Image: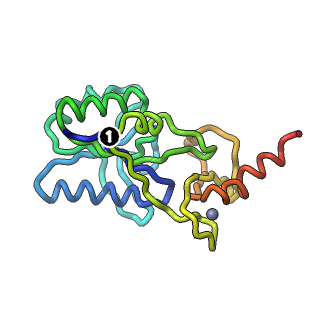
Amino acid sequence: MAKLTFYYGTMSSGKTIDLIQTAYKYNSKGLKAIIMKPSVDTKGNDKVVSRIGMEKKVDILIGKNESINKYIDVLKNINCLIVDEAQFLSKKQVFELFMYTKKYDIPVICYGLKNDFQGNLFEGSASLFSYADQIEKMRALCATPGCPNNASFNARKINGKYVYEGPQVLIGCDDEYDPLCSSCYVDKVLDNVDMECDE
Ligand SMILES: [Zn+2]
């Protein structure tokens, strides 16, 4: 039985490098793996781009309201479907991917973030936690110098300062993200939010 697998991790947990290697493993054996990416992610457009400069072309850029089934003529003739930035999938698309693994017996491997900069689950990730046959956590170290903990939050920085308010997805803004452990996320982000509140 083919599985729907979800590899989740914060920024800098090596998701993209793992994705590129997975595609390479299939393709180097003469098997066909193709890469899908939700088009809401504008970083790299039709490419999967890792922080250390490796990149790979995306085969299918899927729109937020597009059905996976629209691409079924391509998808039914492959050996593996790999999805980058899977947190941006809709609930319906995740369900379609789950059904696709079972109906066509073709594995789907999704890579994505678990939670946004405020700690909330993304729609795609929440659905993947519901439907994935297998869930694996990828590890990244906390970005705070000297902190030995694993990161579990993606803190947003604008102009070098941590922020808590704002939309889930910023488009065309000069935002950066730091992977932080929960205790550094409290110190650097949540504590500052509380200070701004009238108590
Ligand atoms: Zn830390």
Q: Is residue 7 above or below residue 63?
A: below
Residue at image coords 45%, 62%: 51
Numbered marks: total: 1
Residue at image coords 12%, 57%: 29
Residue closest to the far bottom: 146
Q: Is residue 153 visible?
A: yes
Percent coordinates x, y for residue 5 in the rendering: 32, 44
Judge from the rendering whether residue 57 lies leftward or rightward of residue 145; answer left or right. left
Q: Is residue 96 above or below residue 156?
A: above
Percent coordinates x, y for residue 19 in the rendering: 32, 54
Percent coordinates x, y for residue 83 in the rendering: 33, 44
**Type of residue at label 1?**
Asp
**What is the secondary structure assignment of the residue under circle 1?**
loop
Judge from the rendering whether residue 159 lies leftward or rightward of residue 59; answer left or right. right
Q: Is residue 55 above or below residue 70?
A: below
Percent coordinates x, y for residue 105 in the rendering: 18, 36
Judge from the rendering whether residue 117 lies leftward or rightward of residue 44; answer left or right. right
